[in-house]
Image: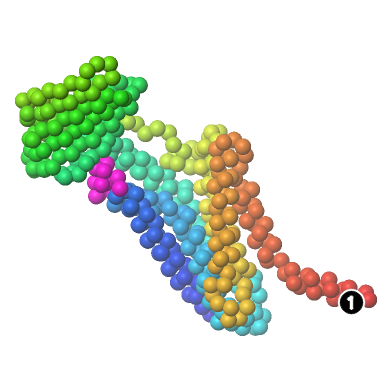
Amino acid sequence: MIIDRHMVRQVAMPCLLVSAVLMIIFVGYSLSRFLTQADAGLLNSAEVIHLTLLKVLIALEVLLPIGLFFGLILGLGKLHSDSEIIAMQASGMGEARMLRPVVALAIPLALFIAVLSFYVRPWAYAQTYTMLALAEASSDIDRIKAGQFYLTRKTAADELSEDQDSERAIFIEKISPDQALERIFIRTRVGDELQLISSQTGLFIEQPESQYHLLELDDARIFKRVDDGPDLFAQIGSFTMRVVNELPEPLRYRSKFVASSVLAESSNPKDRAEYQWRLSTPVTTLLLALLTVPLSRSRPRQGRYAKLLLAFAVYAAYYNLLEVSQTWVKQERASSIWWTPLLLMLLVVLVYIPWRSLGKGGAAAKNEEN
């Protein structure tokens, strides 16, 4: 129908624009987080881009419903402010009839979000955790950039006791293509012990088949502070350090990357919370879309932004309650998160009830009795 196509055009563009803006903001936020790790030498540029794309895929199940919700509020608000809704109502077109174009947008999007939640979300989380595990397992020297400090909490196995924390800071001023190093500084802290090593030149020797790579330093100066004895200082003509060439540890179990079919049969509270979250995302999309028609009601020439503050309050309250309910399921304080979508459904039902008509009908009946 012509009116349906017109309404779809009017509300689809704001939905696309809001979703695009949200994704741009989220990409910038994710990039800033991963670039911080890249500056510390923990990630390279390709990994930063890959991880950012994976984060966007995960976030789409939340960003798209938000984009649809606020886009519909803006689009319907414009129709109200231009008095087009008034004209439609004057021609006998009620709010129930106006739901057709809204539902026409919401149902395909809800199905797409269901696919994202049930299949793309666990895959993207598995890829993310695998990539971060590989990055963590990479040798220190492989990720060092010339002229920058590199911080790590990993040391060779023979330097680290199981009950002690360790951290290492490495600075290399120049690194040539053949792995020749100039002006090296290494600070290692194991528990309360501190070791400083400096050298003017060195060489990094990769041993892919071995458990360790080798770092050979020329005329190395070594200072070591220990708890149970005097401080040590030495200058060694040729000093060799071993750098761990470790394989990534197997991924520990996380509900976020487990297949939905497995979560459905699990009795673990974290698994149940994750599975119910995945089920709730398409339901949330539909409910928020249905809420926009009555929520966007406004007087003629009131402005398309009149109900944005109220829409934001509803959205913020709902998602906060959804997060709380998910946490309660994880903590076994509740068995389900569905009370939150049910509250939203109740709100949708309440705002569709014609309270003014009911009030007028009651008043008219009372006047007739008198």
Which residue is drawn at the image coordinates 65% and 61% (left, top)? 348
Residue 211 shows in this picture: no
Up the image or down, 191 lies above or below 36; here it is above
Mark 1: amino acid: Asn
**Magenta part mainly helix, strand or loop?**
helix
**Residue at horizontal 18%, vertical 39%?**
171
Residue 43 is a magenta residue:
yes
Q: Please state the horizontal and vertical placement of residue 363, each as a whole percent of the image.
A: 84, 73
- Left or right: where does residue 97 sit relative to residue 131? right
Question: Which percent across, then down, holds residue 172?
Answer: 15, 40
Q: In the picture shown, does residue 297 fall above or below 132?
A: below
Q: Is 117 drawn above or below residue 350 in the view shown?
A: above
Report the residue at 50% width, 60% height from top.
Answer: 66
Quadrant holding the N terminus: bottom right
Q: Which residues are magenta?
A: 36-48
Q: Quadrant of residue 237?
A: top left
Q: Residue 8: horizontal and vertical position, in percent?
A: 51, 73
| Residue at the extreme top | 229
Q: Which residue is mark 1?
A: 367
Q: Is residue 182 visible?
A: yes
